[in-house]
Amino acid sequence: MKKRSDRLVAEINQLMAKVTAGWNTSSPFMMDEYACLICNAYFRKEIFKSDLDVIEDLIVFFTSLASLKNASILREILKTTNNLSKNIDSLRLDSKFCQVLSDDLKNKLRDTHETKLTKDSRVHPIEDLPGEDYDDFYGKYARDLDSNWLRNAERLSALKIKKPSRILDIGCGFGFFSHIAKFNGHIVDSIDMPNASPILKAASEILKVKKYDFLIKPNTPLLKFKNKFDHVTAFQIVFNGHASKSLWDVDEWKFFLLDLHDNILKDDGQVTLVFNGEHKALKPIMIDGEHVYLGKKSVEQFFNPFFANKAKMAQRDNKMIAILTKKNIKEACHTSIFKKQSYSLDLVEGKYG
Ligand SMILES: C[S@@+](CC[C@H](N)C(=O)[O-])C[C@H]1O[C@@H](n2cnc3c(N)ncnc32)[C@H](O)[C@@H]1O
């Protein structure tokens, strides 16, 4: 039986050690670079029975990077060959594996931390937080590209999308999620406010995110799109007047969700909302002696049936996530249990208020 030479096996093992080091240190660029290199430099020529362990590990690594297309090509090979036990004469990869992010894109994205700060860079005019420079808040998205990637990879994996889909990402920011979803064959439209932070604008341009400049306002419909969407996502939501005096109450959320229901979602569409709760450096929001993460008891009550359990959440988001389908949006929004309630909160006026 034909086998790979010991020299090449040793080379592959050395490269796999780098992929594993990337996994152990949460360094997705390193993992993706060497995982693709192994596939392109060795498996494009020939795949041998003895490559089974490597391929099984690569499937796990590609999946963690949200390089799901590459993972599924390898999975399909194992399936059709019954784990490389049959039909493996002249077996090889048909096409070249691409990295989720090329080195060129990585360097350009990293440099966005140097983008000139303007008044739009500011997130919250929160005073007295020692050691935090709020004007450079989004600089961390560029400086720590690895975490940015892994957080968005988890987000895409958590959606468990089975077929190429249309996705609308609201408040897309840096654009990493849109890029990763597009890389995996989905059609992605994105929305962000016209005066978003310059770093976010620069990064989403580098990533060629298909973005619409649109300011979401309470009780005002979203843009109209030609096609409807399978998924609407909004990660680390700020458009709801987050941490400002004009934080949305249930009525504003109902308007927003019903608009998604009527105009944006396909019949089997789904909405995934990742709420930006209170800031870790601020005092918890207490209402009537209760800790209220979403800032209003009524909003927390409204979303309560839709909060995803921890296992479904992207661990790196570590936030409250609500998942609604088109069907249960209608039910939730037409119930009369959730009357508008107002609370007196000592919140500061935010940029988006
Ligand atoms: C905390 S960032 C999250 C970015 C991205 N979703 C992520 O998780 O990395 C909030 C995003 O919402 C956008 N945004 C805030 N208020 C908005 C509004 N009223 N309409 C549209 N976008 C808004 C900001 O520009 C920013 O891109």
Image (tube, helix red, strand yellow):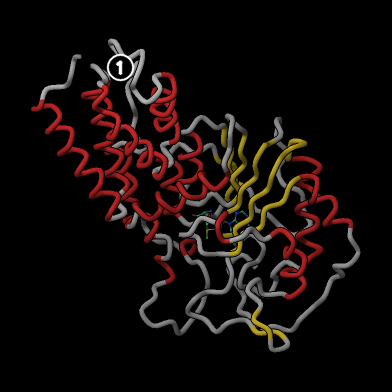
Q: Is residue 193 left or right of residue 24?
A: right
Residue drawn at (44%, 24%) of the image: 79
Q: Residue 69, percent across and down?
A: 44, 30
Quadrant for the N terminus, please.
top left
The answer to whether residue 182 is left or right of residue 55 is right
Lateral position of residue 254 relative to residue 49, left or right: right
Where is residue 24 drawn, in percent x and y? 28, 54
At a point 41% along the width and 33% down the height, the residue shown is: 71
What residue sits 73% from the left and 88% below the top? 288
Q: Toward which corner of the image does residue 344 lie, by quadrant?
A: bottom right
Identify whether 149 is placed above or below 268.
below
Horizontal and vertical percent position of residue 335: 89, 60
Residue 193 visible, this orientation: no
The residue carrying mark 1 is 92
Residue 248 in percent (x, y) is at 72, 66
Q: Nearer the viewer, residue 132 or 295?
A: 295
Which residue of the protein is positioned furthest toward the bottom in this rendering? 289
Q: Secondary structure at mark 1?
A: loop
Vertical comparison of 347 with 294: above or below: below
Mark 1 residue's CB less than 8 Å from ligand 1: no
Quadrant for the C terminus in the image:
bottom right
Q: Residue at x 49, y 76 (%)?
A: 280
User: 222 and 327: which one is in front?
Assistant: 327
Name the outermost residue toward the top.
Answer: 89
> How many numbered discs?
1
Specify whether residue 248 is in view. Answer: yes
Q: Nearer the viewer, residue 22 or 298?
A: 22
Residue 294 lies in what quarter of the image?
A: bottom right
Residue type, numbered disc 1: Arg
**Mark 1 surroundings within 10 Å by alpha-carbon count, few (fewer than 14), some (14 through 19), many (20 or more):** some
